[in-house]
Image (tube, rainbow, N blue to C red):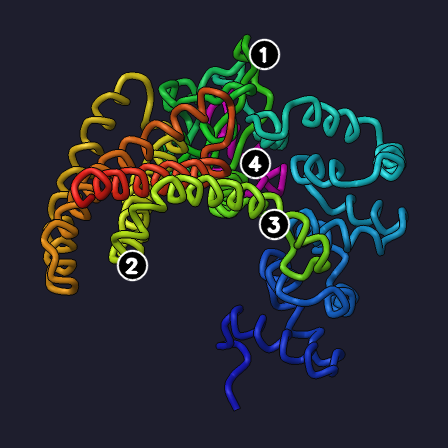
Amino acid sequence: MRDSSHITDKERQNAVADILNSGSFQSARTLIHALQPAEIADLLESLPPSKRKLLWRYIDLKDEGEVLLEVGDEVRESLLSELDTAELIAITENLDVDDLADFVQSLPLKVTDEVLHSMDRQYRDRLEAVLSYPEDSAGGLMDLDAITVRSDVTLDVVLRFLRKKGDIPRHTDRITIIDRYGYYEGVLPVRRLLTENPEVTVASVMRTDVDVINVAMHDADVARLFEDHDLISAPVVDDNNRLLGRITVDDVVDVIREDADQTLMSMAGLRPEDDYFSPVMRSMKRRSIWLGVNLATAFLASWVAGQFADTLDQVVILAVLMSIVPSMGGIAGSQTLTLVIRGQALGQIGAGNTRWILTKEAIVGLLNGLMWSVVVALIAYLWFGDGRVGLVLAMALIINMGVAALAGVMIPIMLKRFSIDPAVAGGVLLTTVTDVVGLMTFLGLATFWLL
């Protein structure tokens, strides 16, 4: 039998799922306790609602809050509906202030009031301070538990202070330096604290060149700053440079993951918090909206094709080849669209380089169009023995792939200008452009040259 200490967390997750699916629940308890809250959350989201309720019974109270924070909104809502107020209050007692701020925002208003009144005044004031900032800002991510010292003390004093404190917050790689009024002055890296002469003052070894984060900074910009500078933690200040708290890498990882999920799901017209096991009718209603939009664009493309009905009646070969041009344009445009949306998300595309990107993508589209036009023209000629049809197909392909590249750049830029998420609407608009332009150029050229 394999030593349980060598079992991976993924194997434990799979084992718990198998046990729950088999109906033997008690034996799952030990395996569940060995999992991290995020792994339990993944397991909950992979189970149907009835099995989730069974799994929830075996989760430690100290982990319940973190598990609820890790699951999607819809799954969290279903789990919270099964808990009474006393249980919710007990859960909040095990959460840090920044995590608690995220948690209480998902609770019903009546329950939120009761949770707030159950706290001591100092803790409630700290929570309300975090809740006063937008959820997608540095203030919304901020952790108020930051270790601070003054610059005029020695390193030995700092070390004795930490020993007396007994415990320090997670991800503490630096100690923040403030003056007597609470204004930020710099940071003392823990490695310097441990390696420098303990008799020297903090002022002589602290760093003042470290970037601080303004409390109003958008969370996506915070994530980019952490990525660019390989940060583990960073101090947060207000407009007057007064220290408010700090942001740690674990919160930034959550932001990065949520943004990635948002982009991926939005491209299909879905939300990252959607539950895989949500009721059929609810899922159907959500997805039907974008199916309806797509249907409207499909009818538009069909209407364009209908304007060339006489051409299709006389040259039946065109009906066989008609889908090639829109399809190739759609793929070419999607490649450009994806790159531009990613560049926007990373802050790499702006007014200063839009023209360069537009020119470059147009050239790439035209060159690809030229290369593949030769291939499709040759195949059309060998297939049907008509060089004119091959030429029409080649010309239409060049035009549509060039237009698709331009549309792939301009659509997300224009949508961004009107505060519309390009990941949501970009694909639908691009499909409309490539279908309409592709059919119009192919059938229009065929009408001009073949009839």
Q: CA distance from mark 2 to mark 4?
A: 77 Å
- Name the foreground residue: 388 vs 271: 388
Q: CA distance from mark 2 to mark 1?
A: 80 Å
User: Label 4: which residue?
Assistant: 162
Q: CA distance from mark 3 to mark 4?
A: 54 Å
Which of the marked residues, 2 or 1, is nearer the chain's N terminus? 1
Q: Amino acid at mark 1?
A: Arg
Q: Residue furthest bottom?
A: 1
State yes or no: discs 2 and 1 in contact (Cβ < 8 Å): no
- In magenta, the rendered stretch is 153-177
Badge 2 element? helix
Which of the marked residues, 2 or 3, is nearer the chain's N terminus? 3
Which of the two marks, 1 or 3, is nearer to us in this view? 3
Percent x, y of residue 43: 62, 65
Q: Is residue 55 magenta?
A: no
Q: Is residue 255 left or right of residue 377?
A: right
Q: Is residue 159 magenta?
A: yes
Which of the marked residues, 1 or 3, is nearer the chain's N terminus? 1
User: Label 2: which residue?
Assistant: 320
- Name the foreground residue: 131 vs 333: 333
Percent x, y of residue 252: 50, 38
Image quarter (top left, top right, bottom left or bottom right) of the C terminus: top left
User: Label 1: which residue?
Assistant: 180
Q: Quadrant of residue 67?
A: bottom right
Please tell me how crowded label 2 is: few (under 14), some (14-19), or many (20+) other residues with Cα within 10 Å.
few
Q: Amino acid at mark 4?
A: Leu
Percent x, y of residue 96: 68, 40
- Name the foreground residue: 130 vs 176: 130
User: Label 3: which residue?
Assistant: 287
Please tell me how crowded label 1 is: few (under 14), some (14-19), or many (20+) other residues with Cα within 10 Å.
few
Please tell me how crowded label 3 is: few (under 14), some (14-19), or many (20+) other residues with Cα within 10 Å.
few
Q: Amino acid at mark 3?
A: Arg
